[in-house]
Image (cartoon, helix red, strand yellow):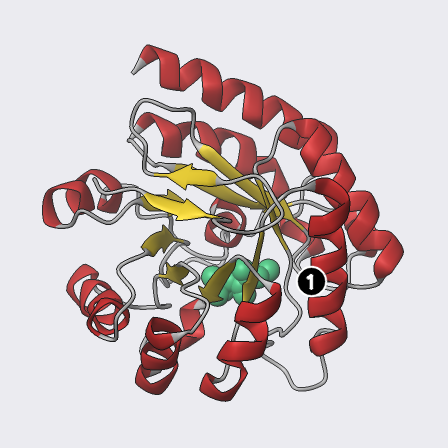
Amino acid sequence: STSVVIGKNRDCTSVIVGDTTASPVIMAGPCAVENKEQLMETALAVKEAGAHVLRGGAFKPRTSPYQFQGLGVDGLHLLSDARDETGLPVVTEVMEPEMVEVVAQHADVLQIGARNMQNFPLLNAAGRNSHKRPVLLKRGLSATIDEWLLAAEYIVAAGNPNVILCERGIRSYDPQTRNVLDLTCVPLLQQLTHLPIIVDPSHATGRSELVPVMSRASIAVGASGLIIEVHPDPNTALCDGKQSITPAQLQKIVHESRMLTHML
Ligand code: PEP
Ligand code: MN
């Protein structure tokens, strides 16, 4: 696969996604940026645990309009501060084409969420972003692999070849898990595309106790990295606490994923 470089020409550590000889890239952080203290504490803790990229939503695509919607532009500034403090590049979601430039100014990777996988104006705008930030394209809630690849093609066709695919589970009928993690798509995509693929075991399962084992499984099938929700106190998280793990649990996953890579 072709690799994608994150954090190039920025005051942070550059990270390569899709380098088959290297350890998997671990992206970690809270579902949502809640406040300065929560973000800084989490950012320092995930760095200490061995993560390479900080995640955190400033614009949250919540199912209900009455749920916490994120801090918006204030959250972007907090993410920038966290990058300055830790040296970790930042990935955060952009929901509207009009916001691509401001998000690209603050973030190192533009995340396009599952609910927006086929928002074609957004895909175009992300492809054209003037900062040339890579795009993390999550699989749509019920998207086929071909629909997902064509969505990626929109970004590439708009001028940005730096797309990372992210499997985050697909919709099915059983509410025991939030989604069904389609791990078969990882080796399948390796046949179909040169783009690197990572897995999000947090949204795939919706259950923190399943995150470590599905992280191991993801690395075993060849994922180039993981994006994991981490909160210092999952019980009080404003968003997705049930699926959020602690920094200590993350540290173990980082260690296990390195060991597994050496075995492959
Ligand atoms: C997220 O990463 O917090 C998120 C909203 O993910 P998804 O788009 O996969 O649901
Ligand atoms: Mn989330």
User: On the picture, is 163 further left or further right than 78?
Assistant: left
Q: Nearer the viewer, residue 140 or 119?
A: 119
Name, please, the residue furthest toward the front: 9
Query: Residue 27 in the image: x percent, y percent?
Result: 54, 43
Query: Residue 230 in the image: x percent, y percent?
Result: 68, 45
Q: Quadrant of residue 171?
A: bottom left
Residue at (23%, 67%) from the top-left corner?
156
Name, please, the residue furthest toward the right: 37
Q: Nearer the viewer, residue 28 or 16?
A: 16
Q: Is residue 68 visible?
A: no
User: On the picture, is 207 further left or further right than 129?
Assistant: right
Name, please, the residue furthest toward the left: 191
CB at disc 1 and ligand 2 closer than 8 Å? yes
Q: Is residue 225 visible?
A: yes
Q: Is residue 231 above or below residue 66?
A: above
Q: Quadrant of residue 184?
A: top left
Q: Is residue 250 above or below residue 159?
A: above
Callout 1: helix, strand or loop?
Answer: loop
Q: Residue at label 1?
A: 32
Residue at (52%, 78%) from the top-left corner?
101
Q: Quadrant of residue 47?
A: top right
Q: Residue type at mark 1?
A: Ala
